[in-house]
């Protein structure tokens, strides 16, 4: 701690310096005037002087020009990183005490100075300065943190806006298809009478594009629920292979459109999982839809179901374009697409995989990807097996036991 | 009857436009991405190109730029199909001659009338 004593009396200055040094304060400087103190620290103004020391003990019976100079300067005790000012006054000198208060002193010390009192005042003044600094520091840290949070929030809002704009653009293509094909069909009926094979193909296109928009709206709604923490699942026992056969119906149109085939490889027996039927369908529509979208025409997609003790695993294997290592890193994260405009070479919102991951994890499962550019991708996920399937096998064992005893 | 190239990565969108154009008696060829579209234009020399903007390998704006840079296709009628608004840089290319713009989803008749005016322009010019 550095202390500056400004006192015109040589004896008193020396005495105060001695007393402070004997109490362990090592950096004590004494001057007979403010001007001399400025010269000592090699500074040209009071502001710089008060920034050079921690505490100034100053006689406030100084000459008028000295005082006014100090009064006009920055108030030392009011700034956080500056010295605190202790006024040195004669007892019963209200004018000096008033002057001290005006100069921004936090306390006064009355002459004759008692050593114990001097040390107490110095100690508490320095303690106050320490507290002020600590508070200023924590306030600054808090402000920095708030600024950072505000930036993050702004970024999230802009990503959300970007996703919503991608989603609405993405809705326009299937919408144009739906209204366009309906127009064509109606026009054809007007001209050529009842439905033909061509019109059947067109109606299938209408249905397919309707499903696409439906899936997209489902993802947008799921994201809203995930964000607001209001996603609830209604899990029931589902036979996984049978459910997957059902889901294929939703994307058959997309497969047909690109002349693609899908093979489902599953155990003959039932594989019971605990899952929300609609969400399971949403998960699979997303994964199969992607496999279809990112694969060349005429290629095939394989879905493999395996069952282990606690989990059932589903692998969706495609022979598509594959995903680069860089793109794999944040593939499942929110706003992946919004953050990577370069990834928009093929249309999409980037919402699907984020929502899919959240849904799988809400079921207590995991999802991951293995892929190499140009060599296709395998998306794998796990879902917890139904507890009932275990209790069921127990029951079978039990009844078997009963049968033997009988 | 005219020869029209449809460049769109969405098979349904191509099928829809093909149905529409064949209904009107035109001959149709298709391209599923921007690179194929450029090749098709060179090989087939169509009378008109319907060009989607968001396509893999080469987007519609890049295709159009390529066509406009080539003297042989400098004035080839092109209708850009977009699902969203273009950037300022991209709208500049819409000012090139014989370039038209239709946004998705369109109302009935919009594509037909764009095709009619695009084709009228060239036949009128010849």
Image: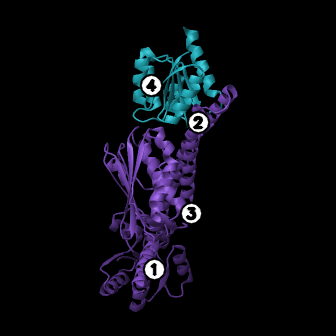
Chain colours: A purple, B cyan
Q: Which residue is mark 2?
A: A200
How far is disc 2 from disc 3 in space, using C-alphas?
Answer: 42 Å
Q: Which residue is mark 4?
A: B65
Which secondary structure lies at badge 2? helix
Tell me the residue at 56%/28% (across/down).
B19
Figure check: A402 above or below A257? below
Figure check: A229 above or below B108? below
Disc 4 or disc 2, which is closer to the eye? 2
Figure check: A192 above or below A340? above
Disc 4 or disc 1, which is closer to the eye? 4
- Chain letter of disc 4 in the image: B
How far is disc 4 from disc 3 in space, using C-alphas?
Answer: 45 Å
Farthest residue in the front direction? A406
Q: Residues within 10 Å of mark 4 (few under 14, many from 20)?
A: some
Q: Which residue is mark 3?
A: A228
Quick one: label 2 or label 3, which is nearer the N terminus?
Answer: 2
- Chain letter of disc 2 in the image: A
Residue A135: x %, y % from top left = 46, 74
Disc 2 or disc 1, which is closer to the eye? 2
Q: Which residue is mark 1?
A: A128
- Chain letter of disc 1 in the image: A
Q: Residues within 10 Å of mark 2 (few under 14, many from 20)?
A: few
Q: Does mark 3 fall on the same chain as mark 1? A: yes
Disc 1 or disc 3, which is closer to the eye? 3
Disc 2 or disc 3, which is closer to the eye? 2
Q: Nearest the camera: A225 or B1?
A: B1
């Amino acid at each position: 701690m550095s202390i500056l004593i400004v006192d015109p009396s040589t004896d008193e200055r020396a005495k105060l310096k001695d007393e402070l040094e004997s109490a362990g304060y090592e950096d004590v400087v004494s001057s007979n005037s403010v001007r001399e103190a400025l010269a000592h620290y090699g500074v040209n103004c009071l502001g710089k002087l008060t920034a050079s020391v921690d505490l100034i003990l100053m006689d406030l019976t100084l000459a008028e020009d000295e005082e006014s100079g100090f009064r006009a300067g920055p108030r030392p005790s009011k700034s956080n990183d500056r010295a605190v000012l202790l006024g040195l006054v004669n007892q019963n000198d209200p004018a000096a005490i008033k002057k001290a208060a005006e100069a921004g002193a936090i306390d006064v010390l009355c002459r004759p100075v008692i050593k114990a009192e001097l040390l107490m005042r110095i100690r508490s003044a320095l303690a106050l300065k320490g507290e002020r600094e600590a508070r200023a520091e924590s306030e600054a840290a808090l402000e920095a943190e708030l600024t950072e949070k505000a930036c993050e929030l702004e970024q999230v809002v802009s990503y959300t806006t970007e996703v919503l704009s991608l989603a609405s653009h993405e809705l326009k293509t299937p919408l144009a298809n739906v209204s366009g094909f309906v127009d064509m069909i109606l026009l054809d009926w007007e001209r050529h009478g009842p439905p033909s094979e061509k019109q059947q193909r067109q109606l299938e296109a209408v249905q397919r594009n309707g499903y696409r928009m439906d899936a997209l709206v489902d993802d947008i709604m799921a994201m809203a629920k995930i964000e607001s923490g209001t996603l609830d699942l209604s899990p029931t026992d589902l036979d996984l292979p049978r459910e997957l056969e059902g889901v294929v119906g939703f994307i058959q149109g997309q497969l047909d459109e690109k002349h693609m085939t899908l093979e489902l490889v599953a155990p003959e027996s039932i594989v019971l999982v605990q899952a929300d039927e609609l969400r399971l369908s949403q998960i699979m529509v997303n994964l199969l839809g992607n496999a279809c979208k990112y694969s060349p025409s005429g290629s095939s997609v394989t879905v493999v179901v395996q069952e282990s003790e606690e989990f059932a695993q589903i692998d969706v294997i495609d022979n598509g374009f594959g995903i680069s290592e860089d793109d794999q890193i944040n593939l499942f994260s929110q706003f992946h697409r919004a953050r990577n405009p370069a990834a928009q070479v093929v249309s999409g919102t980037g919402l699907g995989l984020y929502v899919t991951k959240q849904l799988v994890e809400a079921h207590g499962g995991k999802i991951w990807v293995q892929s190499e550019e140009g060599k296709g991708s395998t998306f794998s996920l796990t879902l917890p097996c139904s507890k009932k399937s275990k209790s069921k096998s127990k029951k079978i064992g039990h009844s078997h036991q009963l049968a033997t005893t009988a | 009857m005219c020869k029209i190239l449809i460049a769109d990565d969405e098979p349904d969108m191509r099928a829809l436009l093909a149905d529409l154009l064949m209904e009107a008696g035109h001959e149709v060829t298709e391209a599923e991405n921007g690179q194929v579209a450029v090749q098709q234009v060179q090989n087939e020399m169509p009378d008109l190109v319907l060009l989607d903007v968001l396509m893999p390998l080469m987007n519609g704006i890049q295709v159009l730029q390529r066509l406009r840079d080539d003297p042989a296709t400098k004035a080839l009628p092109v209708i850009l199909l977009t699902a969203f608004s273009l950037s300022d840089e991209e709208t500049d290319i819409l000012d090139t001659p014989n370039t038209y713009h239709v946004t998705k989803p369109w109302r009935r008749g919009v594509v037909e009338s764009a095709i009619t005016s695009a084709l009228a322009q060239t036949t009128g010019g010849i």
